[in-house]
Amino acid sequence: MYDLHHLRGNTYYIDGPTNCGVYVLNDSLDVLLFDCGTDSDGIKIYETLVKNNMNVKYLVFSHCHADHAGGFEYIYDKTHCKMIASKVERGFFRDPKLDIGFLYGGYPLDEYDGKLMHIDMNDEIYALDEIPAGVEWFHLPGHHFGMIGIKTSDDVYFVADTLGSIDLVERAHILLIYDVKGYLSSLDFVESLDGKIVVPSHSEATTKIKPVVEFNRQNIYHIMDILLDYLKEEHNCVECTSYIFDYYKLKITYNKYMLILSTVRSYLSYLSNSKIIKNYFKDNRLVFINESNE
């Protein structure tokens, strides 16, 4: 773990709990680093780069979650690199309460750990047009507001949290999704890259990404089927979330409840906006129902 792997040309990645992209910019071994793991990961990632005589000049974030950006402080202190993120993500970087408040749906309880997924950054973060030549960015809707991936000049794609490994999905069952329609669209895009080198954040680098995409897609449809079956009778979002916990026999914690409640809301919005289920108010509650006979 935390080894530097050569992919093609000037493109490498460092494996870890979060795979991080490395693109060599010049003969001096100045590099662009894509994501930097947690705070503890950041130390090991930096050590790997130093061992290979690489100098971080740019640090590009896929999105604001701490398993992708938590190592920034150590790396920035060592390198004073230029940090870059999308417009929306730059806002979330400024205050961890912003994202946890979004997930919770209001000001969060003290029991929720804002440091679990989010970080507080006061250093300057630059816009995406500061990404140097040789690297292109692309939007990846679904997991978070302004998540991006990158493509290097070597035709290697880093696709962040667009999907999880088959093992991760089997263990977690339900992954954090903000926009189900956008997530499915991102899966379609990543599937179109089959045959190219694709590096997800939480799955192995591969040229055969299609089976992993399909497993993630079918898992989403399975969760929809679970909700559609449960909604043969009317229920609200909290009841649907409780049912998901029961169905998968998940261990409940404050943070897990917040993440899954937020994700269930997104599923219900997708199903309702797609006219697959109906929503209405009853007894001062917003409820959902699946009136289909299928």
Image: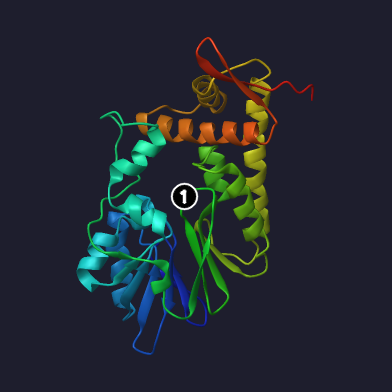
Q: Which residue lies furthest to the bottom in this view?
A: 27
Point out the residue furthest to the left here.
Answer: 77
Seen in the image, is 79 located left or right of residue 186?
left
Amino acid type, callout 1 = Phe
Residue under label 1: 145
Q: Using the image, determine if residue 222 lies above or below residue 115.
A: above
Quadrant where the N terminus is found in the figure: bottom left
**Seen from this angle, which residue lies furthest right?**
294
Q: Which residue is drawn at 67% across and 36% down?
A: 274
Measured along the vertical axis of the image, is residue 135 above or below residue 199? Answer: below
- Taking the spot 41% from the left edge, 60% from the top edge, the residue there is 86
Is residue 281 visible to the viewer in this orientation of the structure? yes
Indicate whether 93 appears above or below 274: below
Q: Is residue 41 left or right of residue 221?
A: left
Q: Residue 248 occupies which quadrant of the picture?
A: top right
Rendering coords of residue 102 (x, y %): 39, 38
Q: Quadrant of the C terminus?
A: top right
Using the image as rendered, state which of residue 152 and residue 22 is in the foreground: 152
Q: How crowded is mark 1: few (under 14 residues within 10 Å), some or many (20 or more)?
A: many
In-front residue for pair 57/199: 57
Query: For the point 43% across and 63% down, which residue is it?
Result: 15
Q: In percent of the image, x 29 and y 37: which residue is there? A: 113
Return the x and y of residue 143 as percentages of the image width and height. Answer: 50, 48
In the rendered image, residue 278, in percent from the top left (x then y), is placed at 66, 24
Q: Say what secondary structure mark 1 lies in.
A: loop
Residue 197 falls in image quadrant: bottom right
